[in-house]
Each structure stands twice: as structure tokens, then as C-alpha cells.
Image: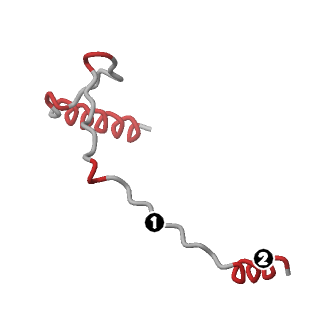
Amino acid sequence: MWKLALGFAVFAGVALWVISKGGDSLDMGGEKHGADAVHAPDAPASAAVVVPAVVPVSPAASAAASAASAG
């Protein structure tokens, strides 16, 4: 049982040390609203998602596919 308590104390100490070394970049204040909120800039138009074109299916291929799935 004492090993569990010692492990918790060591883990808590390491966690507090890491948080304290975070400096100003580590904000533990929670969710921000209003003027305090920092938003990432919008992506440029050139980084838009490209959607591939839909290839039309011939009626014969469509009939073959429906016949295969029915059987």
C-alpha cells in the first residue's frame, strides 16, 4: 500500500513540475469567450478540399450490379 502512495506522490510531483515549466504558453484558465478568445486564422482558398468528380455508371453496369446483389 505504501508503494501506491509513494507512486502517486512522485507522479503528482512530476506533473506539477511539468506544468510549472510550461510558462506563459500553458493556459490552465479553461475555455475562453469574448475578447480573451484566440482564434486560428482561416485557411487560404488554395487549401480548399478537392472533391473528385462523380463518374456516371452505364445502364448495363447498373443492371448487372443490381442483378448480382439480388441473387
**In this rendering, would 59 be left or right of 33?**
right
Q: Nearer the viewer, residue 41 or 18?
A: 41
The answer to whether residue 55 is above or below residue 30 is below
Q: Residues within 10 Å of mark 2 (few under 14, many from 20)?
A: few
Query: What residue is shown at x 17% (from left), y 32% (from top)?
Result: 25
**Disc on res. 19:** none
The picture quadrant where one finds residue 26 is top left
Q: How is the image coloured?
A: secondary structure
| Image location (x, y in percent) of residue 45 | 28, 48
Spatial separation of the CA atoms under disc 2 and disc 1: 24 Å
- Amino acid type, residue under disc 2 in the picture: Ser
Quadrant where the C terminus lies? bottom right
Query: What residue is shown at x 28% (from left), y 37% (from top)?
Result: 10
| Image location (x, y in percent) of residue 57 | 63, 76
The picture quadrant where one finds residue 14 is top left
Query: What residue is shown at x 21% (from left), y 36% (from top)?
Result: 18
The residue that label 2 is drawn on is 66
Quadrant where the N terminus lies? top left
User: Counting residues from the N terminus, which is met first, the one under dot 2 or under dot 1?
Assistant: 1
- Amino acid type, residue under disc 1 in the picture: Pro
Q: Nearer the viewer, residue 28 or 46?
A: 46
Query: What residue is shown at x 31% (from left), y 38% (from top)?
Result: 11
The residue that label 1 is drawn on is 52
**In this rendering, would 38 be left or right of 6?**
left
Q: Secondary structure at mark 2?
A: helix
| Image location (x, y in percent) of residue 69 | 79, 77
**In this rendering, would 32 be left or right of 57?**
left
Q: Secondary structure at mark 1?
A: loop
Q: Residues within 10 Å of mark 1 (few under 14, many from 20)?
A: few
The answer to whether residue 36 is above or below residue 38 is above
State how many labels appear.
2
